[in-house]
Amino acid sequence: MLSRVELRHLRYYVAVAEEENVSRAALRLHVSQPALSRQIRDLEEELGFFLLERGAKSVSLTDAGRVFLKEAKAVLDRTELAVEKAREVARGAKGELHIGYAPSLTPKILPRVLRAYQTEQKGIKVLLHDLSTEEMLTKLRDGTLHIALTIKPTKATMRGMCYEELATSPTCVAVHREHAFAKRKTITLLQAVKEPMIGYNRIEYPEYHEDMAALFAPTKAKFRIVEEYDSATSLIAAVEAGGGVAIVPGTLSCIAGERLKLIPLEDAEPLSIGATWSKEGLIPSANRFLQLAIDLAAAEKNS
C-alpha cells in the first residue's frame, strides 16, 4: 500500500523525467536541488524500485520509470480535471440541479423559470421530479432534491424548511361540462360539501386531506371522498367521467383544458404556491434558480 506517495512526489518526478536533469527540474519547480533529489529518493524507497538512472550531468528513465511516468501523468491530469469539475460545480457553472414539482400547481411558473435558467446556465442539467408534497419534503431533507415548487407546506411540515411564495391560485370546484354546477360563476362551501368528491390518495397526499378538512370545517358537514387517485391526470379523467367533483387549484385548468369546468369556491382562501428548500442552504446553481423564480414572479405580479 503506497500510503506515503503524495501528489507532490508525482509532480516532482514528472518534472525530473521530462527535463532529464535535476537542476533544471528544480528551477522549474522553484525548489532547491538537494530537496528535489531527496524527494525522488524517498519516492523510489517507497516504491521499492529505481525510477532513474543517474549520470554525471543528467538522468534517464529505467524501464519501470517510463511506465511510472505515464501513469503518474495520468493521475495528475485526472486530479486536475477533478478539481476543475468541482470548482465549476461550486461556482454553479456545471452539474445537475434536481427540482421537485407538482404539475397541477406549476404549469405557469415552471416553464417560464426553466426557459430563463437554461438560457443563462447552459452547463447545468436540470432534472425534474413529479412528486407529492410529502415526497418533496422528504427528498429535500435527505438532499435528493435541491428545490421544490409546491403548495405552501403546513407549519408542522415546515420544520427545517424555507418557503418563498411565487404565486397564488384560487381554490375551485372542478366539474364535468354537463354537471349542474357547470353554469355557475361561483359555488359555496355548503353547495360543494353535498357533492360526492374525488381527491388525491390519502397515503401519498395526507396534506390534501388535512386541507380539505380545514376547508369544510365551518360548514359542520362531513364531506365525502368517494374516489382517490395518485395523479392530477387520473383525477381529471375521473371528474370528466362524472364520478364526482374535485376541490383543486385554479392552475389545474392549464392541464384540464376544455375537459372540465373550474368554478371558484366562495369563502376559500387562495392557495399559496412557491419554492421550498432546506434551511441548510442552497448550492450556487439552486440559489440562481430560486432567484430567477422570485424575479420572474415579481415581474408577473407587476405586469
Image (spheres, rainbow, N blue to C red):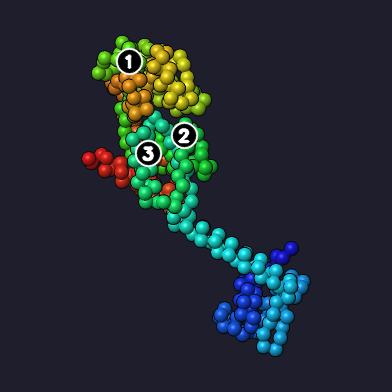
Q: Residue furthest bottom?
A: 56
Callout 3: SS = helix
Q: Quadrant of residue 208?
A: top left
Callout 1: SS = loop
Residue 225 left/right relative to 185: right
The kind of residue on which mark 3 rests is Leu
Q: Which residue is mark 2?
A: 130
Pick the quarter of the image with the C terminus: top left
Pick the quarter of the image with the N terminus: bottom right
Residue 24, given in percent of the width and then of the height, sits at 59, 83
Q: Tell me if mark 1 has few (under 14), some (14-19) or many (20+) residues whose alpha carbon lies within 10 angstroms of its own.
A: some
Q: Residue at x 57, y 78 (%)?
A: 29
The kind of residue on which mark 1 rests is Arg
Q: Nearer the viewer, residue 74 or 83?
A: 74
Q: Is residue 240 above or below residue 272?
A: above
- Whether residues under marks 3 and 2 lie with C-beta atoms below 8 angstroms apart, the answer is no
Q: Nearer the viewer, residue 155 or 137?
A: 137
Cα distance between the residues tagged 3 and 2: 12 Å
Cα distance between the residues tagged 2 and 1: 28 Å
Callout 2: SS = strand
Q: Which residue is mark 1?
A: 177
